[in-house]
Amino acid sequence: MAKTKSAYFCQNCGYESAKWLGKCPSCNQWNTFVEELVEKQSSSVPAWKTTPGSQRSNKPNKVENIESSMETRIPTGDQELDRVLGGGLVTGSVTLIGGEPGIGKSTLMLQLALNMTQKRILYISGEESEQQIKMRAERITTSPKAECYILTETSTQNIFKQIQQLDPELVIVDSIQTLHSSQIESTPGSVSQVRECTAELLRFAKETNTPVFLIGHITKDGAIAGPKILEHMVDTVLQFEGDRHHIYRILRSIKNRFGAAAELGIYAMNGNGLREVTNPSEILLSQRDEELSGIAISATLEGARPMLIETQALVSVAAYGTPQRSATGFDTRRMNMLLAVLEKRCGFRLSTRDVFLNIAGGIKVEDPAIDLAVLVAIISSHEDISVSSKICFAAEVGLSGEIRAVNRIDQRISEADKLGFERIFVSRYNMKGLTKEKYSLEIIGVSKIEDVFTALFG
């Protein structure tokens, strides 16, 4: 009888060690090593059968001798998903979707499978029964003629047998943490099992040119569960975000080998599934009847999509001695930097004030063009003077108080013009080469924070 071999794996990054270690030498995390049984593969044959033509011997080629060709894109019928993927599904690609429990990952994938009526799709579920999936499909289906097949299985060997018989054009796995391979003697969801199952699906996708979707769990820190190498193995990593107590969901691209890695898709969750939101500015701008202090509108960019978002600030007297600094959807360290600029360059005494900042709509913004709107919202709340809802801002603020230029200013101005804004404040250095005549709103170029406050508050 062969001796059982075991090894220790880091649950955070997948680092393998022959003995237990308190601290992982790869990711420097403590107490993450667990013991797992490991059995080496007895043969070099992959877990699934390949066609005779797929086993080929590759030879190195010079760059100029390689024929370039555009990758084949498969439209999914979902405009938001196509935008995030870079124009559609690429044949042979492996896409990983992560998100919190109950956020709607399975609903999004099942809705995709039911909408692609021209493709033969295999939906593999290791978490739900066929009856549960059928109940969800009846609630969200728009085309009962979809050629979607449901398989409730967790063994990769059995899965590949069914794939050979069905020959699907798209495979969806829900979820990768529930699969297990007989090549590895460890429990499903462990580091070695997740890595091996993903490797088998990756080989299948590349050698048959079949796109594969993997649904992944996330940890309490918000990262995708399993080894970090999982995100390196796949072609695309998508994050499905949102609050379960609100109806809006955000699909964000974290990594994309076939497109931009900064795209954003927005959905609204209702009783009939996920609805695409084609104009996100409508949900990110609140409809208010009267002007309120502490609110400013900023023209931002998420990938190639311009959006107008509402920045809300509240400045009050620190009741407990130590001022509080809190930001939702915005970097707190950057907010502290902007407050220091107001203290030093403009003379506003905010060191004894509580400052709270919120980005409406529940999204996270990293675009530096929101800086000016943040400062205007803070001063508006501090002085209790409202800013007109027909004014928006698109500029970065430097440490010396200068207003810096931002990229693709014409797209930001066009979006503000389309939504009916009357004035937009931009950097004076963005005015070069800008044609004002083609816009109906007034474009104001400023170079210092003082110029903005003088124009708004007098």
Image (cartoon, helix red, strand yellow):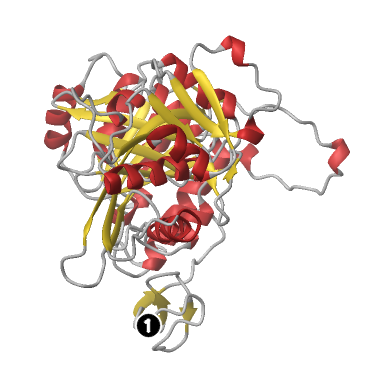
Q: Nearer the viewer, residue 14 or 399?
A: 399
Element type at mark 1: loop
Residue 314 lies, with reference to residue 252, above or below; the image says below
User: Could you say which is closer to the camera, residue 79 or residue 297?
Assistant: 297
Label 1 packing within 10 angstroms: few (<14), some (14-19), many (20+)? few
Front residue of 330 and 45: 330
What's the amino acid at mark 1?
Trp
The answer to whether 300 appears left or right of 101 in the picture is right
Q: Is residue 162 visible?
A: yes
Which image quadrant: the N terminus?
bottom left
Of 150 and 396, the residue lying toward us:
396
Check the image and report above or below for 328 versus 13.
Answer: above
**Where is residue 382 drawn, in percent x and y?**
29, 49
Image quarter (top left, top right, bottom left or bottom right) of the C terminus? top left
User: Can you say whether 452 is above or below 443 in the image?
Assistant: below
- Say whether residue 47 is visible: no
Tell me which residue sits at (34%, 42%) in the image: 377
Indicate the position of residue 47 as horizontal and vertical percent values.
46, 53
| Point 45% across, 70% down: residue | 14
Q: How many marks?
A: 1
Which residue has dot 1 on it? 30
Above or below 187: residue 458: above
Q: Residue furthest front?
A: 458
Residue 287: quarter of image = top left
Place of residue 185 in the rendered image (x, y in percent of width and height, measured from the top left)? 35, 70
